[in-house]
Image (cartoon, rainbow, N blue to C red):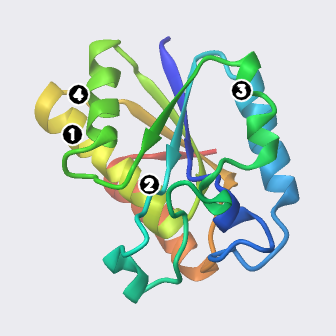
Amino acid sequence: MNKVLVVVDMQNDFLLEEGSLNLGHDTKELREKVAELAKGFEGKVYFTYDNHQEDDCEFGTFPKHCVEHTSGHQLVEELKAILKEIEFETLAKKSYTGGSILNLANQLADNDIQEVHVVGVCTHICVHDIVGTLVNHTKNFHGYIPEIIIHKDLVDDFNPDMAEFALKRMESLYGAKLV
């Protein structure tokens, strides 16, 4: 079966203690386990990047984070270390309505991808939005929905209550399988 792994926003600003929008707890184990999964994954790995300009309007709601060309925008070292060993593609996910996530949805359909594994951060915003976009776009424009498998121990968030709700919502609304 054709399958892919989508690694959502595993960037320094979210996952390192000094990150400007860090998750508020130690993420070393998460970083190591996601790198291990990606390294051993039998299929293509897609890395999404939260991507902002210096004056992004989102910074009225959240602290400035993941600004292009800054260290906070970069992929965490644990994942950088395996890039030479895996087949991967990077995606800037700033735009859900006309950007690279829709391109990914089209690639899934074009390559008959039936299984999409998802890991990463922030569960109730980034992970949820990407899953919703992939499901809705493949359903509405390609006539099928790939099986979405969320590795619930390999997603994390700065708001545990919202993360738990998002997982339940992705399971009930989008048919995601939580493993």
Q: Which of 141 and 75 is in front in this view?
A: 75
Q: Name the residue under label 1.
A: 137
Q: Quadrant of residue 87?
A: top right
Q: Is mark 1 on a helix, strand or loop?
A: helix
| Residue 42 horizontal/vertical position (percent) | 65, 16
Report crowding for label 3: few under 14, some 14 to 19, many 20 or more residues within 10 A (C-alpha): some
- Front position among marks 1 and 3: 3
Q: In which quarter of the image is residue 5?
A: top right
Tell me if label 4 and label 2 are in contact, CB under 8 Å.
no
Tell me if label 1 and label 4 are in contact, CB under 8 Å.
no
Q: What element carries label 3?
A: helix
Lateral position of residue 107 relative to residue 1, left or right: left
Q: Which amino acid does label 3 sit on?
A: Leu
Tell me if label 1 and label 2 are in contact, CB under 8 Å.
no
Above or below residue 14? Residue 91 is above
Q: Which amino acid does label 1 sit on?
A: His
Q: Name the residue under label 3.
A: 83
Query: What's the CA distance linking mark 1 and mark 2?
Result: 17 Å
Query: What's the CA distance linking mark 1 and mark 3?
Result: 28 Å
| Residue 108 horizontal/vertical position (percent) | 34, 23
- N-terminal of the two: label 1 or label 2? 1
Above or below residue 45? Residue 172 is below
Report crowding for label 4: few under 14, some 14 to 19, many 20 or more residues within 10 A (C-alpha): some
Query: What's the CA distance linking mark 1 and mark 4?
Result: 9 Å
Report crowding for label 1: few under 14, some 14 to 19, many 20 or more residues within 10 A (C-alpha): many
Q: Which amino acid does label 4 sit on?
A: Tyr
Q: Name the residue under label 4.
A: 144
Lateral position of residue 53 relative to residue 69, left or right: left
Q: Nearer the viewer, residue 108 or 172?
A: 108
Q: Name the residue under label 2.
A: 171
Residue that appears at 52% across and 25% down = 4
Q: Is mark 4 on a helix, strand or loop?
A: loop
